Amino acid sequence: MRRVSAPIVTIVLILLSSLVPLVPRKAFAEPARSGCGVGRGPALSELSCELAAGLGERATGALVAGVTPTGEPKIAVRAELGARMAALVAGALGKSATAWPSTESSTRARSLGQGSRPLVLVTTRIVDTRIEVSADAYVGRETLWRRVRRGGSGPVAHAFASRPLDPEVKSFLPAVPLVAREVMKASGADRDTVALACGDADGDGAPEIAALGRRRVTIGRLRGGRVETAVERPLAALSPIAPAPLREPIAAAWFAGPGVLELGSTDRAFALRLDGRLETLAALGTRVPWPGGGCAPDGELGVGSRVTPCVAGDEAPTPAPAEGAPFDTVAGARIIGKGGTVSVVRATRTVGASNAVVTAGARTETVENAGAQLALGDLDGDGTAEVVTSLDTRDPSTDAVVVRSLLPKRGVKEWFRVPVPNGVRAISVCPLRAAAMAPIVVSTGDELWVIR
Amino acid sequence: MTKPFAVSRRTAAAAVLYAPLGWALGRTPIGGTLRLTLPFVARELDPHAADDPFAALFAPALADPLFALDSDGRPYPALAADLPEDTAAGARITLRKGLTSARGKALDGRDAVFSLLRSRRLGGAAVLGELGVPRADPKDPSSFFFPDTNAVAAAVALANPLTALVPKTFSPRSPDGTGAFIATLEAGRVVFARNLRAARGAAFLARVEVTQALDLASALRAFETGAADVGFLGAGLHRPRQGAAPFEGPEYGFLVLRSGRDAKSWGAPGVAQGLVDRVPSGALRHLGVRDAGGAARAGTAWGGGPTELLVQEDAPLFRQIAEVIAPHLAGAGTIVVRALARRELVERRASGAYTLMVDFVRSAGPRGRMTMLSLLAAASPDLAARPPRAVSFEPKDVARTLPLGVVGALSFSGARSPSVAGLESFQLGAVSLG
């Protein structure tokens, strides 16, 4: 028999190992979402909880190491995010697991396996509006000789989780300026839009736009300069006309979670909680949901201030300012601070007033010359809220979208304004993006604008 | 079997609600009191009255019809849940759930039938005369039928304010409905307050106060001095009020001269129109009376001897108009103007026991066939039920076949304070004070 030389064997094995797909030795664990929350708390905390649950028993007592994080589109992600993620996963795995103190390259990280305990490699990737993290558990040491003899060993357990970006994650990314670089306009919008929401309706990670009109609700995207409706429902099939509607409707819409849309207007008898296909999940207790959580009570000339749970069993919502009701506009958002603390910021405008009042915990700020369209969100991911308003004008040609920030301690700073000569009918803030300001969606009647 | 309606139901559902510009941008200001001083104020307010100028202008603020017409004249549901459906039993109409009148009465299909029968008996003959007699749906209290009537005809007819929905307990002295306001009638004054139960949206204004003026001069003086926010037919008595903005309101009806049984041969059809043809064009322009339209003729002088020209007592404007036209109808002193209480005037008109009378006919709809039906119904409700084929729908031409003559058309125009917005359509619920 002809003898084959050792170098040739090595090359062949390496080539084979690169062609054969990574076949799991054990079935991969499904992401365990239960109990970890989705979009309600800090992203890193939810991710680590979900990854630990996904790895299960096979990662008990593991050494957890973070691989150098990457970004797409190409973005400089601070290496500390890898180590931070590893530490959180180790914490979620339990006391016997420990975290490697620094971020390592994938080759170096894989070589950390000691044989006596599992090794978990945590790989973090930033993809536009989301953070994606995978965790792979290995057993045994990975030496060069072992790779040569048996090929690279695969993980014994794998888990994957993904969440929208939040300020804590954004703190590992380059800061983005609050400027309007581009206004993208799309035709084909409903002229009678009264509220907008922007978020992930179908769980694919990309944001969609939900538009509440006076006769229908739609979910769609902007494509080729047109509004492309993916799903629509006539409101008559969802909620009857209110016995005593307001002459000028007050409306609100927001994504309360991935694939959970809450919307309502004073035109209709009750507000709705819908899924991403616009199927009813629940009829809400009042006519207008309050973005950020809870429902605004019905009032005679506007909506009231005592926020209530929208349906029995919902958690108690963060209170709204008691003074100033009735309101002709309500807005709100869950803002996650850099340290991962979650707070609900609310904004209101009293009927007949021309300014908005923003409340964040005990803090209250007044925004002058605010119109009837308000939205809140963290546009730059710095952990403080931006207030997006229309102007208090009856002349469409003088209307504009104005973006202001709550300053860290006190006061409000205007960053920019974009004239909207057809008038602003509704505003919403889209999810954070890695390399740019969170987009703002504006209904101008015939068009939808995306300011980014 | 249900038949699809000419208007898309989706479009219709959209239009149930008012759609003012102000749903976006800054909101329309809410609150304030609009003050009007007018030379005609009623002691009763009846949405189904076709002979009352005050009702023509103000009743739509109190009560809504079941349907409304869009800018192309297509009907859409207002208080109805949907457009009518054609069934074997006729057009079936269902009301929205939860409708409540300003005074707290729950409203359903039985109130609708009551309202339509009442309207048909009163001023709605022009609109409902050609339709069947409505009856309640025994299976569904929120529905009713129009037998032998198709859905389109029913929806168009029921979009007319003369067919407005009122509760079964309706009284014109304490009027009630689903409109933007609730009215309180006082001596010489009517106060409209915002109706928070309004089925199509409560008014922006908190109140509208309408005070009766003794004459047109008093009304203009009230505006000039700032006691009123709207100048009826002008911007002031002596000089225009500073900052006043002109406005042109809608045509709300016709001023007519009726000839009764006591006029004998001078009461024949066409004679009254011949008499008013003698009134020079422009003689009544300062009183808000415009040419109604139709062929102009030389006219015929009254030859029935000395007589009275009856006119409504609590409508000073009409008294003034009567004083102007009386000398043109015959020689000076032949015809004497006599004011009567509205109730007596209505009785005289019903019995025909008068010679000449100045009266009001409400416009039942836009110019055209509805003009003809309005005038026919004013002459006799039976005529509106079987209208003739007319060559012309012009008011004067129609009147030449009737025992009444059209003096002119009435419209609400004048001047407004610059703070008053949305007055042009005279939908009081949409008026605001900036």
Image (spheres, coloured by chain):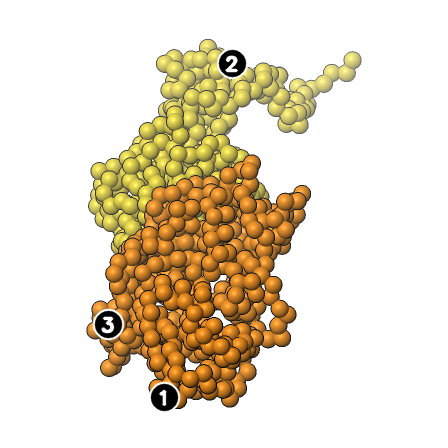
Chain colours: A yellow, B orange
Q: Local crowd at mark 3 within 10 Å, few (<14), some, or many (≥20)?
A: many
Q: Is residue B245 visible?
A: no
Amino acid type at circle 2 is Gly
Q: Position of residue B26 (x, y in %)?
A: 34, 57
Asked if the residue under mark 3 is in contact with the one under mark 2, i.e. CB atoms within 8 Å, the reply is no
- Disc 2 to disc 3, C-alpha distance: 99 Å
Q: Nearer the viewer, residue B347 or B417?
A: B347
**Residue carrying label 1:** B332
| A24 over A411 or under it: above or below | above
Label 1 residue SS: loop
Q: Nearer the viewer, mark 2 or mark 1?
A: 1
Q: Which residue appears at 54% of the width and 73% of the height? A: B402
Disc 2 chain ID:
A
Q: Earlier in the sequence, mark 1 or mark 3?
A: 3
Q: Which residue appears at 43% of the width and 41% of the height? A: B98
**Residue carrying label 2:** A140
Q: Nearer the viewer, mark 2 or mark 3?
A: 3
Q: Nearer the viewer, mark 1 or mark 3?
A: 1
Q: Which residue appears at 49% of the width and 31% of the height? A: A281
Q: Nearer the viewer, residue A64 or B268?
A: B268
- Disc 2 to disc 1, C-alpha distance: 124 Å
Q: Are marks 1 and 3 on the same chain?
A: yes
Q: Position of residue A388 (x, y in %)?
A: 35, 50
Amino acid type at circle 1 is Ala
Disc number for residue B222: 3
Quarter occupied by the N terminus of chain A = top right
Label 3 residue SS: helix
Disc 3 chain ID:
B
Q: Is residue B363 visible?
A: yes
